[in-house]
Image: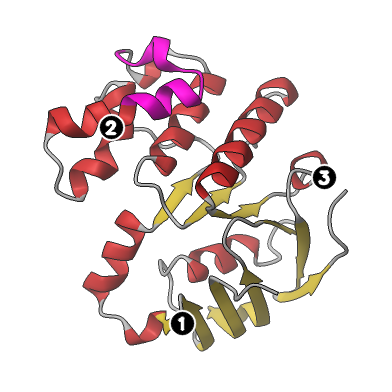
Amino acid sequence: MTTSLLTATGLRKIYSGTPALDGADFAIRAGETVAVMGPSGSGKSTLLHCLAGIVPPDEGTITYEGRELSAMSDGERSALRRSRFGFVFQFGQLVPELTCVENVALPLRLTGLGRREAERAARPWLERLEVDDVAHHRPGEISGGQGQRVAVARALATTPRVIFADEPTGALDSLNGERVMELLTAAARETSAAVVLVTHEARVAAYADREIVVRDGRTRSLEPAS
């Protein structure tokens, strides 16, 4: 079996005396898509935030490419999120004042690229996600499905090793949701990116290679999704 790219062992996270995670484990390999499922309040999003280095666990270890996140400085973890991790959220969270191409170019700008170079690099991702025709529109001028495709393009722009997708289709109808998942998983396979997919929808989880269920802060692996 290929060595895991991102691994978590024995994660515990407590908020106001209540465990959000209570001994959760996780592992994902490069190029693999893993669906994280479970009821509301089960700890799915907390697990994602810990894996991405956004929230530190109270106990347990998280290792990315053989190095523990807790051993990294705040600056190193921030750099990791800018360049090696990509993020897709339920409502896209595009910057409303920027055009779509500027939104996709934003993470590239944060890595130090100039505006023209970053936007030039962003255009192929808009084309791949089938939204190049709205490149110069602002988020308020496009549909929800188009906006989520732009958000996926932004997540992929830095060619990340891991994409964290938190309910990426939750605000979309079934047709747009399926197209977003098709494009996201296809692009991830082409770039060998791992995808951590948090969802409560079985039809979305079906795009994953396997599923993990979170319940009461603990994880349980299921058979590979068909």
Q: Which secondary structure lies at badge 1?
A: loop
In the image, is residue 14 above or below residue 178? below
Q: Amino acid at mark 3?
A: Ala
Residue 216 sits in quarter:
bottom right
In the image, is residue 54 above or below residue 144? below
Marks 3/1: CA distance?
A: 32 Å
Q: Amino acid at mark 1?
A: Gly
- Within 10 angstroms of label 1, few (less than 14), some, or many (20 or more) residues? few
Identify which residue is drawn at 31% across, 30% down. 122
- Name the residue nearer the viewer: 70 or 124: 124
In front: label 2 or label 3: 2
Q: Which residues are magenta?
A: 123-136
Q: Is residue 222 magenta?
A: no
Picture coordinates of residue 23, whole percent (x, y): 67, 85
Q: Amino acid at mark 2?
A: Ala
Marks 2/3: CA distance?
A: 34 Å
Marks 1/2: CA distance?
A: 30 Å
In front: label 3 or label 1: 1
Q: Which residue has dot 2 on it?
A: 121
Q: Which residue has dot 1 on it?
A: 66
Q: Which secondary structure lies at badge 2?
A: helix
Q: Which residue has dot 3 on it?
A: 202
Q: Earlier in the sequence, mark 3 or mark 1?
A: 1
In the image, is residue 166 above or below residue 23? above
